[in-house]
Amino acid sequence: MIKDPNTLSSMKAIRTGFKLLLAVILATGLNSCSKSDKSINIFSVDDDITLGEQIDKQITSDPATYPILDSVQYATAYSHLYRIRNTILKSGQLTYANRFAWKCRIIHSDTTVNAFCVSGGNIYVYSGIIKFLDNEAEFAGVLAHEMAHADRRHTTDMLTVKYGVDLLLGLLLGNNPDKLSELAANLAEGLGSLAYSRQNEYEADKYAVHYLYATSYDAASLGDFFTKINGESQALIFLSTHPSPADRLEKINAEFQLLGGAHGQVYADRYQQFKASLP
């Protein structure tokens, strides 16, 4: 049966209006975030957690792409990683320190200098970046930067902009496993439209400095890290996933000075123990 064109147009308008209404409801009614979180997206914080767990399942089910070190066999390495993570969480600076699980995975690839953190706080660190760095404060700076992306909800902000309501709801409901696999890969490698914006990177840097400054770590070490990776061929993957404009180091140092400019500890010897615990 051929329907009247006017009727079809009306139905399409209704569907479009419903999607827009749903987006507004999700963004304003279900997005239960604190006053310090200015994110506006169609995810609630619980949705962040759900999506993060789905991405984690995708990653752990693909050992060929993500060869994750066993947490029992390499218990010492994981104890170092969780100790550093816990120090950052205890800074009192993270909005979702107690709400996100902040699960940690070490991916065994000594040639990959990279780390990433997905929505809901799950953290993935390649062995290559651990071995590349010189001290614990530098590594804590990297970890704090990645945790800031999750705590400031940059991933779901980005997904809200890049994807429509239908796809996002499908991911949350587990209806699109192929897209979930693609999403996991893109987040891990910062590919295409899922690379963080320059503003996201600036904000993650700023909050990482605040996180570290409230601990015994030398918060200026985040700047030391970026100085180290510039011009290093080993760090090309990290540089491709974390764009480094010329003024980024300047902004990190300015934020450090704004907080008082007091240097902390770098824990070089302890970090060597962390590196030695890896295969």
Image (cartoon, rainbow, N blue to C red):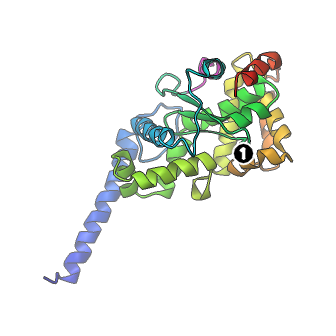
**x and y percentages locating residue 230 in the rendered image:** 84, 45
Image check: 81 left or right of 128?
left
The quadrant in which the N terminus is found is: bottom left
Tell me the quarter of the image containing the C terminus: top right
Residue furthest to the left in view is: 1
Instruction: Check if residue 85 falls in the magenta segment.
Output: yes
Q: Is residue 209 above or below residue 159?
A: above
- In the rendered view, would you say 238 is above or below 213? below
Q: Residue at x 52, y 28 (%)?
A: 103
Residue 112 locus on image (x, y percent): 71, 43
Give the residue number, with chain letter if any, for mark 1: 238
Residue 261 falls left or right of residue 35: right
Q: Is residue 258 visible?
A: no
Q: Secondary structure at mark 1?
A: helix
For residue 204, which quarter of the picture? Answer: top right
Towards the viewer: 43 or 51: 51
User: Does the magenta portion include 167?
Assistant: no
210 vs 57, nearest the viewer: 57
Residue 77 visible in rendering: yes
Q: Find the magenta span and give its range.
A: 84-94
